[in-house]
Image: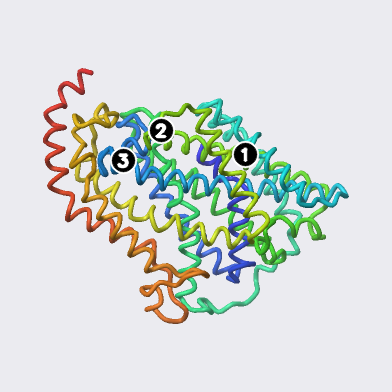
Amino acid sequence: MWAGASVQVEYFVYGAIMVGAFGFSFRETVVLIVLGNLSYLLLGVSSLQGPTAGTTVFAINRASYGPQGSRLISLFNWLTLIGFEVEGLILIVGAGLVLMLKAGLSPGTPAKVVLAVVAIVIQAVLPFLGHATIVKTLRWLIVPCIVIFAALLAFADGHMRLDVASQPFARGWQYFMVGLAFTIALSGLGWTECGNDYSRYVAPDASKAAVVGWVFLGTAAPQVLVMTLGAAIGTFLSSVGTNANAFLPFATQRAVPGWFVVVFLVFCIIQLFGVNSLDLYSSGVTLQALGLNVKRYQAVLIDSGICVAVTLYAVFNASFKTYLSDFVACVICWIAPWLAIFLVDWAMRRYRYVASELQRTDRRSIYWATGGVNWAAIVAQAVGTTLSVLSLDQVFYVGPIAAAFGNGGADVSIFTGLAGGGLVYLLLGLPTVRRQTAAADSLAPAEAAG
């Protein structure tokens, strides 16, 4: 499933943006891609809780934040997933517009609106059908998409300028850190809040090393290749991502035959629908964890209504790179500290939860803490998020911690968020976790019998 989500055009576009919009050389981009994709180890580790807990990420999250405190983090995740859905929809609309141009049409505002609405309707189908259908669809798409990307590489050979000389860190290591934050956030870090939504279907006695290893192999390996291909194409299609339609350069370029551009974009659209189904599925279960009494189809309809509005705004008002940069900053600032708190909490509980208690949201839950809120986690989240914001280096904002590194600033927001959230929770959360672990131990025989 994860390989099916990684062999896709979003990562191709990311690679092209790093060369064309960020201005990194091909060699620098490859280094950033490899380093950034190591973050998929985080996805592997944050997929280890589901097999034994048997439930979704933000049901498990009730242990660390409390049943009531977890609602706030669930809201952040829901908004993040909508952002990823919108990203996919922007690309789908862009691909549709280029296909219309290739057909000799001149699409204007009505065409953009129609494409966005039709895309919303189509993308809602897979989440209605459920997890098993999503997994099968993504598996089926792996081989055709590999063939399509290989053919694109063959057509582009001879046009790519991979040997352009560039001094390593020519713009300073600080700017390199901006690219690294972009890559990590849109690679492993950006998926960690969804991992257990799918690993919960894995057998409880599955090897932890195998779970981490296969998740990492299925994500990092194909994504490194696809992003590298995007970077190579970006050396001669340098305007990818610099306007609202990331695919617009394909409408006028001469390196790739027109008929293949049509095939490529059609497969891209199909793949994007498959990947967006993962976000819609996780968004639905997150809404339920938030406490809303909604069925799957209702969650899909809620998401779809919001997505079409945000997609139209983005299509008409921003470059794709600007949307991504702004979105990356939002993702980093809450996910980095949350992930540290989530994993530190799991370790302090000796890597186990009482599965039945995770489903309780009343005062009788052993994870109730104080008024349903584990304030240690909330404080740690606030500290980690604040440190992350102060360490951002983006076009619209440079935090004082980032600026302290000089030369325009260095984005260390991921690392300060992880360190701040994890360390504060380790210091403040231990008493509460010890009490809850003792209560869990007393429930162990009954849990086993159940």
Between circles 3 and 2, the one closer to the viewer is 2
Of residue 150 and residue 436, the one placed in the foreground of this image is 436
Mark linked to residue 220: none
Quarter of the image for the C terminus: give it. top left
Q: Secondary structure at mark 1?
A: helix
- Residue 219: horizontal and vertical position, in percent? 49, 46
Q: Name the residue rendered at 20%, 23% in the picture.
A: 447
Give the quadrant of residue 50: top left
Q: Which badge, 1 or 2, comes first in the chain's sequence?
A: 1
Badge 3 local density, few (<14 within 10 Å), some, or many (20+)?
many
The residue that mark 1 highlights is 273
Give the quadrant of residue 438: top left
Is the residue 311 above or below the residue 367 in the image?
A: below
- Residue 358: horizontal and vertical position, in percent? 27, 32
The residue that mark 2 highlights is 292
Q: Which badge, 3 or 1, comes first in the chain's sequence?
A: 3
Badge 2 local density, few (<14 within 10 Å), some, or many (20+)?
few
Q: Name the residue rendered at 60%, 52% in the picture.
A: 226
* Three-letter code, disc 3: Asn
Of residue 314 and residue 448, the one placed in the foreground of this image is 314
- Residue 100: horizontal and vertical position, in percent? 81, 47
* Three-letter code, disc 2: Leu
The residue that mark 3 highlights is 61
Of residue 280 and residue 205, the one placed in the foreground of this image is 280
